[in-house]
Image (tube, grey):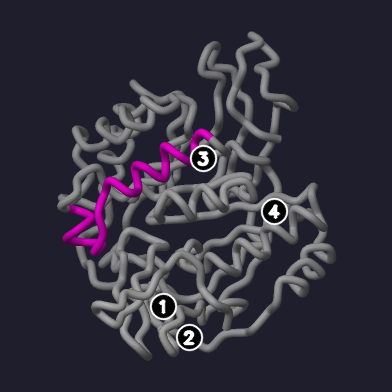
């Protein structure tokens, strides 16, 4: 248990105000914030999840999903418990919405583990919401960059973090996949217990500092209209049309029982998004997930169930010399 960052004690309310994320929880003595990981103990805020790991696996990096960052490699993926959203459709609710039995692993042990794993390009903080693991993630990322500078640090996140902590940790992050769950605030408030604007701000800030890809889970009747997908694509394109967008098929889970996303709908949504973006992919759908040159349409990367074949070795199309946004 380590002292948390980004908070102050309010003498008027006798509560701690947490400033890590836009929830801005006011936490009384002995209580935890919405994320369940930051606790007021004797008027000091502690990160009670520091070093506490619920899940570890060696995954293909495409599973994050990251298609334009070190394609064809594996990455050690780890997660803790808790989340600063309450998404009714959560795919990992077993670890994100409750406190679980954990294994305590200090950063030094993770460094030694990374060294022992073959064909591993680094570490991915994922499964639950990584930014509520902030203190541990920052410490471990710093140690990786010091001890293993060739290794990458990846974060799979809902993007719900305030600008100051985001700016502080970004120098140690090599790639992010950020969930943009919808493009209307009412969706975020009704289905996630959060708000849209901070997520848009995270995408804007992070994309200027490191590699970013975006994922939208298309839920029938909630955020799957062509108009909303076009709004998402236009927003991303206004930052950089080369940012990959992953449109993922929803299946019933947790508190939401709507039927799975219609396959024809999601494939048509992809075509709408491609009017604004150079790279749009589908998740949870059997489809063409290859990467093509946006200029000459030459096949650059072929994918088949996380098996990847590369026809390109640098960020330049071998056929037409177009620069493509892929990090090898």
- The residue that label 1 is drawn on is 94
Q: Looking at the image, is mark 4 or mark 2 earlier in the sequence?
A: 4
Front disc: 1 or 3: 3
State the separation of the CA atoms marked 4 and 2.
27 Å
Residue 30 image point, x, y percent: 37, 90
- The residue that label 2 is drawn on is 100
Q: Looking at the image, is mark 1 or mark 3 earlier in the sequence?
A: 1
Q: Look at the image and say whether residue 37 sits in the magenta stretch.
A: no
Q: Are marks 1 and 3 in contact (CB under 8 Å)?
A: no
Q: Give the image quarter of residue 34.
A: bottom left
Query: Mark 4, residues whose alpha carbon is within 10 Å: few (<14), some, or many (≥20)?
Result: many
Query: At 29% from the left edge and 32% from the top edge, which residue is drawn?
Result: 268
The quadrant of the rendering that contains the N terminus is bottom right
Residue 102 image point, x, y percent: 57, 85
Q: Are marks 1 and 2 in contact (CB under 8 Å)?
A: yes
Check residue 60 in the rendering and tell me which mark sits there, or answer none: none
Kind of element beneath mark 1: helix
Residue 214 image point, x, y percent: 43, 42
Would residue 293 appear left or right of 104 to someone viewing this image? Answer: left
State the separation of the CA atoms marked 1 and 2.
9 Å
Q: Nearer the viewer, residue 250 or 51?
A: 51
Would residue 24 appear left or right of 306 to someone viewing this image? Answer: left
State the separation of the CA atoms marked 3 and 4.
18 Å
- The residue that label 4 is drawn on is 74
Kind of element beneath mark 3: strand
Q: Looking at the image, is mark 1 or mark 4 earlier in the sequence?
A: 4
- The residue that label 3 is drawn on is 212
- The mark total stands at 4
- Does any portion of residue 253 appear in the rendered image? no
Q: Look at the image and say whether residue 202 sits in the magenta stretch.
A: yes
């Amino acid at each position: 248990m380590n002292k948390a960052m980004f908070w102050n004690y309010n003498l008027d309310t006798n509560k701690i105000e947490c400033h890590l994320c836009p929830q801005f929880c006011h936490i009384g003595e002995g209580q935890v914030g919405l994320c369940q990981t930051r606790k007021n103990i004797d008027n000091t805020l502690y990160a009670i999840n520091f070093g506490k790991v619920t899940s570890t696996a060696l995954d293909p990096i495409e599973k994050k999903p990251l298609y334009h960052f070190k394609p064809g490699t594996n990455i050690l993926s780890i997660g803790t418990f808790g989340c600063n959203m309450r998404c009714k459709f959560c795919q990992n609710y077993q670890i994100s919405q409750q406190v679980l039995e954990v294994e305590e692993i200090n950063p030094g042990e993770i460094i030694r583990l990374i060294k022992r794993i073959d064909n591993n390009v680094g570490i991915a903080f994922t499964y639950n919401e990584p930014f509520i693991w902030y203190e541990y993630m920052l410490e471990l990322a710093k140690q990786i960059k010091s001890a293993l500078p060739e290794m990458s640090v990846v974060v799979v996140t809902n993007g719900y973090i305030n600008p100051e902590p985001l700016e502080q940790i970004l120098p140690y992050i090599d790639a992010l996949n950020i969930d943009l769950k919808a493009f209307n605030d009412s969706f975020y408030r009704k289905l996630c217990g959060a708000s849209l604007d901070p997520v848009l701000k995270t995408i804007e800030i992070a994309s200027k500092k490191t590699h970013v890809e975006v994922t939208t889970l298309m839920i029938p009747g909630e955020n799957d209209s062509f108009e909303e997908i076009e709004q998402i694509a236009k927003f991303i394109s206004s930052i950089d049309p080369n940012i990959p967008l992953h449109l993922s098929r929803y299946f019933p889970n947790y508190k939401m029982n709507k039927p799975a996303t219609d396959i024809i709908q999601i494939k048509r949504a992809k075509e709408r998004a491609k009017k604004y973006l150079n790279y749009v992919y589908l998740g949870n759908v059997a489809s063409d997930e290859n990467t093509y040159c946006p200029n000459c349409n030459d096949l650059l990367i072929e994918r088949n169930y996380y098996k990847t074949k590369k026809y390109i070795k640098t960020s330049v199309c071998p056929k037409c010399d177009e620069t493509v946004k892929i990090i090898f």
